[in-house]
């Protein structure tokens, strides 16, 4: 093996101390003067021959010295293996595209058709699971819409049919939270819905001006009550997503503080508030609406510095998550049985890849959309990505954005993580957060 100083090393001075971060191992190590001198020597081309065996082993374990090309190939293999792993079936199911809200930034703004899933479509989904996907070891469903609870009848019926198949099953739901009545909440556990994502756009006055009912009227108070109901009467986790954009970013802290007081301490382990940065998927926002990568980084660093809030933490994930649209066993199913690869495409006929109903062969256009999502805009084939310091911890970004860039280079999206260009600041925040947590313990 051609082991040498890895290009994935970064030595930084933070608050008077020196650290080395390696993105291959995702290790962050504090350095004493002797270690710093050794690493600086290796960084400048020094020989490994005089490095003691025990020290060299530590350097190898943390990938500080490594065969970078072999490691890149390992990442490529692991990524491709995950893409072809068909042991699990992941379905995003839209019981309806109808919605009781009319939010100005919704990427489905023109797709709120009043189509509701029928029993025939439910049965077609179950039949596909029992035939085409009969060998899967487990099934996971994300209930999506529109507003999925606008068709709770199908959501419940189809859940029961899938559960009856007998394979390990779990589900989550993305909902606006307005229709979480006692009747619905009391059935969440039975339907194995163990997590809900509910969007809040700010404190009551801001939220009620943005997330409004179809006929007008605010929604904050009802959603607030329903969140309490879910935590009290089910085992489900609740993630409150606060949409953050150029018009309401300063209100995130107020929402977080509101829920820290409104939610009883015994539910803290099942309740989270997290920012959701608005992307202009549907071209419905003005220029001030979107948060680009740098603004996202500045926002996260600022709320930690000023308020000690760290909704995501600051440390890169070592799982190298890649969006599951690259996997054949991932499907988005519309209310009429139409199939998509990405939920950004729901309601757009030109983005379907087939139908769960009937035996019609996909059209040439549908096959192209499918192949784009499976293989186009691949970060593994992108020289810029392959040469990036963050390649080992970045899954290549959003495939939707990468494919968009391939077809529309004149209007590029930015699929890169917000840590890019901000590594030292994020490491400093991570160390401060770690020290803060140690004091609290």
Image (tube, grey):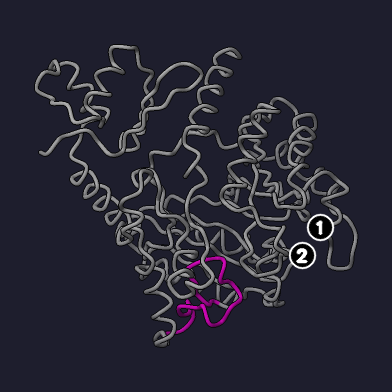
Which residue is found at the position 26% from the left and 23% from the top? Answer: 39
The residue lying toward the viewer, choosing from 223 and 180, is: 223
The residue lying toward the viewer, choosing from 169 and 298, is: 298
Label drawn at residue 255: none
Q: Which residues are magenta?
A: 337-359
Disc 1 to disc 2: CB gap under 8 Å: yes
Which residue is found at the position 39% from the left and 22% from the top? Answer: 19
Q: Residue tagged by mark 2?
A: 104
Q: Secondary structure at mark 1?
A: helix
Q: Secondary structure at mark 2?
A: loop
Please state the horizontal and vertical placement of residue 101, each as a whole percent of the image. Answer: 78, 63
When the figure is inspected, residue 222 is found, relative to residue 408, above or below; the finding is above
- Is 132 displayed left or right of 95 in the figure? left
Does the segment drawn in magenta span residue 357? yes
Which residue is found at the position 82% from the left and 43% from the top? Answer: 203
Q: Quadrant of the C terminus?
A: top right
Q: Quadrant of residue 337?
A: bottom right
The residue lying toward the viewer, choosing from 156 and 268, is: 268
Does the segment drawn in magenta span residue 228? no
Which residue is found at the position 21% from the left and 26% from the top? Answer: 42
Q: Residue tagged by mark 1?
A: 210
Please state the horizontal and vertical placement of residue 434, each as a whole percent of the image. Answer: 52, 21
Q: Quadrant of residue 365?
A: bottom left
When the figure is inspected, residue 71 is found, relative to residue 54, above or below; the finding is below
Mark 1: few, some, or many residues within 10 Å (few <14, many ≥20)? some
Instruction: Compute the Cα span from label 1 to label 2.
Output: 7 Å
Q: Quadrant of the N terminus?
A: top left
- Is 68 displayed left or right of 400 in the figure? left
């Amino acid at each position: 093996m051609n082991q040498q100083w890895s290009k994935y090393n970064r030595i930084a001075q933070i608050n008077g101390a020196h650290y080395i971060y390696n993105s291959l191992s995702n290790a962050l190590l504090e350095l004493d003067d002797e270690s710093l001198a050794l690493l600086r020597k290796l960084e400048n081309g020094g020989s490994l021959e005089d490095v003691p065996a025990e020290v060299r082993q530590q350097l190898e374990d943390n990938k500080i010295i490594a065969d970078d090309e072999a490691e890149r190939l390992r990442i490529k293999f692991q990524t491709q293996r995950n893409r072809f792993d068909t042991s699990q079936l992941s379905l995003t199911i839209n019981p309806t595209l109808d919605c009781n809200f009319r939010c100005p930034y919704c990427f489905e703004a023109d797709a709120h058709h009043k189509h509701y899933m029928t029993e025939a479509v439910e049965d077609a989904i179950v039949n596909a699971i029992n035939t085409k996907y009969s060998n899967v070891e487990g099934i996971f469903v994300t209930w999506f819409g529109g507003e999925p609870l606008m068709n709770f009848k199908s959501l419940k019926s189809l859940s029961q049919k899938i559960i009856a198949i007998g394979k390990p099953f779990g589900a989550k739901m993305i909902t606006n939270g307005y229709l979480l009545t006692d009747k619905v909440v009391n059935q969440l556990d039975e339907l194995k819905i163990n997590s809900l994502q509910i969007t809040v756009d700010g404190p009551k006055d801001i939220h009620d001006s943005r997330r409004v009912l179809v006929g007008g009227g605010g929604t904050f108070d009802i959603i607030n009550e329903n969140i309490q109901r879910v935590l009290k009467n089910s085992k489900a986790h609740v993630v409150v997503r606060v949409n953050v954009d150029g018009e309401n970013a300063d209100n995130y802290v107020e929402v977080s503080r509101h829920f820290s007081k409104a939610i009883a301490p015994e539910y803290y382990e099942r309740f989270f508030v997290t920012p959701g940065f608005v992307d202009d998927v549907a071209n419905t926002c003005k220029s001030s609406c979107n948060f680009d990568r740098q603004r996202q980084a500045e926002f996260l660093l600022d709320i930690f510095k000023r308020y000690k809030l760290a909704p995501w933490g600051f440390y890169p994930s070592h799982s190298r998550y890649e969006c599951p649209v690259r996997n054949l066993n991932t499907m988005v199913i519309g209310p009429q049985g139409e199939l998509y690869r990405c939920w950004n495409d729901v309601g757009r006929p030109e983005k379907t890849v087939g139908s769960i109903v009937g035996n019609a062969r996909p059209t040439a256009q549908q096959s192209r959309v499918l192949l784009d999502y499976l293989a186009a805009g691949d970060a593994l084939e992108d020289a810029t990505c392959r040469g990036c310091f963050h390649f080992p911890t970045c899954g290549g970004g959003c495939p939707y954005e990468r494919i968009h860039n391939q077809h529309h280079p004149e209007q590029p999206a930015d699929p890169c993580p917000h840590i890019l260009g901000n590594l030292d600041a994020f490491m400093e925040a991570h160390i401060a957060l770690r020290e803060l947590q140690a004091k609290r313990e």
